[in-house]
Amino acid sequence: MEYVAFDFETANHEKASACSLGAVRVRNGIMEAHFYELIDPKTYFTPKNIAIHGILPEDVAGQADYAEVIARFTDFTKGLPVVSHSQFDRRVIQAENRRYRRSALGLDYFDSYQLARSIWAGKLPRFGLKPLSEQIKFEFNHHNALEDSRAAAYIIHALGMYTKSETVEELLAAAGVQAFYKL
């Protein structure tokens, strides 16, 4: 299976406030490369969000903005399908693209939460990133964008093994998902 798992952290409740982006590129079940950058969100931080991820305004001062980071992320994907755990990260990209007047990224997107809920319906009580990671025995530092992207990749790997899927397309079919979303 070949894909890129990614995750954002945000400075506040607004989706257009990305302050970090983490990703792992997976080929044949191996995490072959990782990507992590802090992002200057050019907006305010809330104490609640700081408490969740630990990123402070001074940590991102002088860092690249979303437009610069997303361009490097798009290069990092090498055109592979991208996955995040829930629609939150997809909505961050959509909101930030609107904010920066950027066109769509042109990437195929799928959602590990959606796949897990479909494939493991009735077998697990909760499908959040942390509960699923606990179920598959993957330990990680939750709310760190790189760690969360690694957790999403492990979930995809577990789903692939469970369904005996060798490609992302086979995994989508096993979950009853008709097609990728577009980013």
Image (cartoon, grey):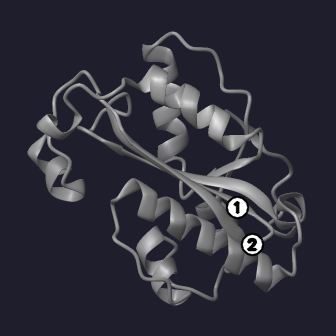
**Category of crowding for the residue at label 2, using alpha-carbon neighbours closer than 10 angstroms: few (below 14), some (14–19), many (at least 20):** some
Q: Quadrant of residue 74?
A: top right
Q: Can you give x and y, in whole percent of width and height, for residue 127 in the image?
A: 52, 73
SS at mark 2?
loop
Q: Is residue 153 above or below residue 45?
A: below
Quadrant of the image for the N terminus? bottom right
Per the image, the residue denoted by label 1 is 26
Label number found at residue 29: 2
Tally of numbered tags? 2
Q: Can you give x and y, in whole percent of width and height, for residue 177 in the image?
A: 81, 56
- In the image: residue 15, left or right of residue 1: left
Q: Residue furthest left?
A: 47
Q: Residue at x 20, y 48 (%)?
A: 55
**Category of crowding for the residue at label 1, using alpha-carbon neighbours closer than 10 angstroms: few (below 14), some (14–19), many (at least 20):** many
Q: Residue at x 74, y 72 (%)?
A: 29
Q: Residue at x 89, y 71 (%)?
A: 166
State if disc 1 and disc 2 touch (CB < 8 Å). Answer: yes
Q: Is residue 2 above or below residue 157?
A: above
Residue type at numbered disc 1: Val
Q: Residue at x 64, y 85 (%)?
A: 122
Q: Can you give x and y, in whole percent of width and height, for residue 115 in the image?
A: 69, 65
Q: Is residue 163 above or below residue 95?
A: below
Quadrant of the image for the C terminus? top right
Residue type at numbered disc 2: Gly
**What is the C-alpha distance between the residues marked 2 and 1?**
6 Å
Q: Can you give x and y, in whole percent of width and height, for residue 156 in the image?
A: 68, 69
- In the image: residue 112, left or right of residue 12: right
